[in-house]
């Protein structure tokens, strides 16, 4: 979630247009099902680091966590065992319906809501998380809302995976696999990405800052094994692919993609039985809301510090 010391508005479209565009990205029920099935869960190392940071100034059990832009719950339910209650909030009713349909945690609640008008009481939340989504927000408005709902010493954690590569013991094979993957995601789908929004995530949120004194920025590495079929399912969950599919409903990009991967691997197995290892950077921004004594010591309000 460093460069210029200030927070920024992510994109140039007006608020109403931006909100409608964001909602429409994930509105389709079919996309919500694909999203739930194929999007990876939150990286356990990131969740562990977030919880450890939150515990530094918290001696009692956590009461409430809020996962903003929760999608269909990829990272929400991982928090359930650590909090009395977890609320997942997303602007898309289709995503929330899918999250509710598959929810197995009794203390997790999902509701439709806006990251810039969070439907939670003031000073009630120990932890706010947001994964793979803050680049869609008006970041300043989001920060004000987070500051409103966090308790003193409450934590905001924003994280996102960066661009993927495919890993292999043979460097030449690794290079070829990664080239094939990027030709699909960046060449075939090139005209279907939202460039200003996507560029913010690509850069690892370097332009975003959380104006609390206790703020840190971490880059980690994330690795996952998946079959080629699972990899193509992951690609199918991209908003860029969904736009491509809408314009090209009869074009199959995955059968030739699987064939290219299998040739590069010199494999004679089926796509659903061929495992590849993906790797990517994981960018994590964490900040702690000051308590009353710290606020007095630093002599600023959130609004003053932000400006």
Image: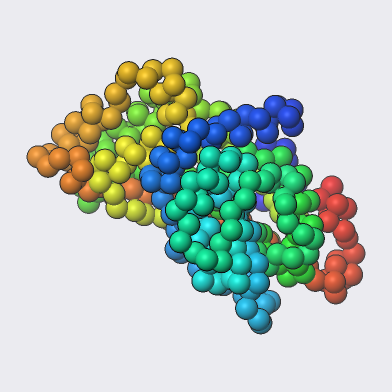
Q: Of all residues shown, which one is farthest toward the bottom?
A: 59
Front-most of residues 178 and 85: 85
Residue 251 falls left or right of residue 17: left
Rendering quarter of residue 54: bottom right
Residue 37 x %, y %: 38, 46
Front-most of residues 206 and 31: 31
Residue at 32% across / 37% down in the picture? 232
Residue at 51% across / 28% down in the picture? 193
Q: How many marks?
A: 0
Q: Of all residues shown, which one is farthest toward the left?
A: 268
Residue at 17% across / 37% down in the picture? 262
Residue 189 x %, y %: 42, 25
Q: Is residue 184 visible?
A: yes
Residue 210 x %, y %: 71, 54
Residue at 52% across / 45% down in the picture? 97
74 lies above or below 258: below
169 lies above or below 78: above
Residue 249 x %, y %: 37, 19
Q: Is residue 3 visible?
A: no
216 lies above or below 162: below
Residue 3 falls left or right of residue 79: right
């Amino acid at each position: 979630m460093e460069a210029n010391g200030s927070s920024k508005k992510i994109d140039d479209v007006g608020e109403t247009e931006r909100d409608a565009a964001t909602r429409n990205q994930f509105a389709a029920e079919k996309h919500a099902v694909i999203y739930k099935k194929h999007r990876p869960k939150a990286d356990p190392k990131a969740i562990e680091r977030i919880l450890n940071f939150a515990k530094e100034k918290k001696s009692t059990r956590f009461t409430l966590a809020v996962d903003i832009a929760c999608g269909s719950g990829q990272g929400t339910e991982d928090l359930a065992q650590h909090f009395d209650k977890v609320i997942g909030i997303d602007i898309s009713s289709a995503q929330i319906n899918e999250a509710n349909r598959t929810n197995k945690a009794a203390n997790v609640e999902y509701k439709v809501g806006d990251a810039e008008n969070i439907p939670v009481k003031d000073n009630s939340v120990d932890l706010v998380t947001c994964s793979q989504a803050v680049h869609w927000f008006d970041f300043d408005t989001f920060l004000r809302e987070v500051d409103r709902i966090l308790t003193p010493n409450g934590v905001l954690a924003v994280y996102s995976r960066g661009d993927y590569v495919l890993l292999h013991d043979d460097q030449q094979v690794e290079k070829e696999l990664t080239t094939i993957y990027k030709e699909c995601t960046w060449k075939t789908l090139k005209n279907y990405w939202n460039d200003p929004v996507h560029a913010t995530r690509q850069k690892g949120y370097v332009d975003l800052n959380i104006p609390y004194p206790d703020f840190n920025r971490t880059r980690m590495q994330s690795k996952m094994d998946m079959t080629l079929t699972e990899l193509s399912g992951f690609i199918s969950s991209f908003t860029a692919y969904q736009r491509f599919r809408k314009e090209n409903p009869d074009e199959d990009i995955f059968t030739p993609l699987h064939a290219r991967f299998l040739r590069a691997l010199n494999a004679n197995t089926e796509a659903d039985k061929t495992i590849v290892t993906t790797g990517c950077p994981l960018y994590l921004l964490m900040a702690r809301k000051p308590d009353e004594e710290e606020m007095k010591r630093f002599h600023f309000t959130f609004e003053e510090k932000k400006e």
